[in-house]
Every structure is written in C-alpha cells, then in structure tokens.
Image (cartoon, rainbow, N blue to C red):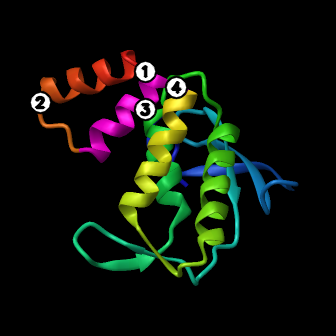
C-alpha cells in the first residue's frame, strides 16, 4: 500500500477490523515518514468491465478511483472515510446499472458531479486531469463555470 503522504510503498498494519461499510478496515503506519493512514479492503466484483477512451476493456478497479480522488482531495478537508464512501456509492451505482461494461467517461462524469458538490478545489484538480486541461484558459473557463452556478 502506497503512503498518501510520502508515496513510500512500505507500511505496517497497526490495527485491522471488520467494518460495517467495508469488508476490512486497516490502520497503517508508513515505515518511511511515520504518518498513519486508513485503508479499506473489499472483494471486487469480477463482472464489471470498464471501456477506456482508447477502446480497450479492463476489469473495474476501485483502487484507481480511490487514488484519483485521494490526489484531488489532498490537503482538503475531506477524509479517507468520505472518499471511501464516495467510491462505494459509485461502485454500487455502476453495479445497479447492470450493464456489464461501463465507459470510463461515465465514471468520470459521476466523479465530477460528486466532487463539485463536495469541494470546488478538489473538483478543479480532478477536472484538470479528466478533461485534459492544456493551458490556463481551460482552468479559467472551468472556474468561471463554477462561479456562475
């Protein structure tokens, strides 16, 4: 597990317990910086597939969504538990669609909508990567759209 503070891959588990929202909740301590963080482990559904922008298909990976949200929410007043709940809700929403395969753009749009209502800065960070901002005007246009709503 990668430390969200220093990006080191070595950590030790301090506490592990079953959670009502998730399968297993683990408190970890980074062996490099000493910071503590929480991880959640769940069983993934092998049936859900994601259709990428380039047309390739891969299994649904909640960790990718989690990593993207953690980066977007870094140094914002959003806890890992809040992010975990967002990912759980999105995963359930995708399963409820009962499609078998979902386009990555659909997931990105759902994430943007959730972040927009949660934290505008996190929204802008995520949008800059998802929408592939290439210059300052892209940011200005998005900030203006956020301000007008």
Residue 74 horizontal/vertical position (percent): 48, 30
Pointer 2 residue? 135
Query: Looking at the image, do the residues carrying marks 3 and 2 touch, with CB atoms under 8 Å apart?
Result: no
Pointer 4 residue? 119
Q: Residue furthest front?
A: 149
Report the residue at 38% width, 63% height from top: 104
Which quadrant of the view contains residue 92? bottom right
Closest to the observer, 47 or 24: 47
Within 10 Å of disc 3 (Cα), the crowding (few <14, some 14-19, many 20+) is many
Left or right, 146 with respect to 86, comes to left
| N-terminal-most mark, 1 or 2 | 2
Query: Looking at the image, do the residues carrying marks 4 and 3 touch, with CB atoms under 8 Å apart?
Result: yes
How far, Cα to Cα, is label 3 from label 2? Answer: 17 Å
Query: Looking at the image, do the residues carrying marks 1 and 2 touch, with CB atoms under 8 Å apart?
Result: no
Closer to the eye: label 1 or 2: 1
| In the depicted structure, whether residue 90 falls above or below residue 111 | below
| N-terminal-most mark, 1 or 4 | 4
How far, Cα to Cα, is label 4 from label 3? Answer: 6 Å
Report the residue at 69% width, 47% height from top: 85
Q: Residue 149 carries which label?
A: 1
| N-terminal-most mark, 1 or 3 | 3
Range drawn in magenta = 119-131
Q: What element carries label 1?
A: loop
**Residue 11 sits inside the magenta stretch:** no
Instruction: Please state the total of marks drawn on the protein image.
Output: 4
Residue 107 can be seen in this image: yes
Q: Main secondary structure of the magenta part?
A: helix
């Amino acid at each position: 597990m990668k430390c969200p503070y220093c990006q080191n891959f070595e950590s030790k588990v301090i506490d592990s317990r079953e959670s009502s929202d998730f399968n297993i909740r683990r408190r970890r301590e980074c062996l490099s910086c000493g910071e503590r963080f929480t991880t959640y482990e769940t069983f993934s559904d092998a049936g859900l597939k994601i259709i990428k922008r380039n047309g390739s298909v891969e299994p649904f990976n909640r960790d990718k969504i989690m990593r993207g949200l953690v980066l977007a929410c870094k140094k914002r007043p959003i806890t890992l538990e809040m992010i975990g709940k967002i990912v759980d809700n999105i995963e359930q929403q995708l399963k409820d669609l009962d499609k078998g395969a979902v386009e990555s753009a659909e997931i990105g749009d759902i994430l943007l909508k959730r972040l927009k209502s949660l934290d505008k800065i996190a929204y802008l960070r995520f949008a800059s990567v998802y929408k592939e901002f290439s210059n300052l005007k892209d940011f200005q246009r998005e900030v203006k759209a956020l301000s007008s709503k």
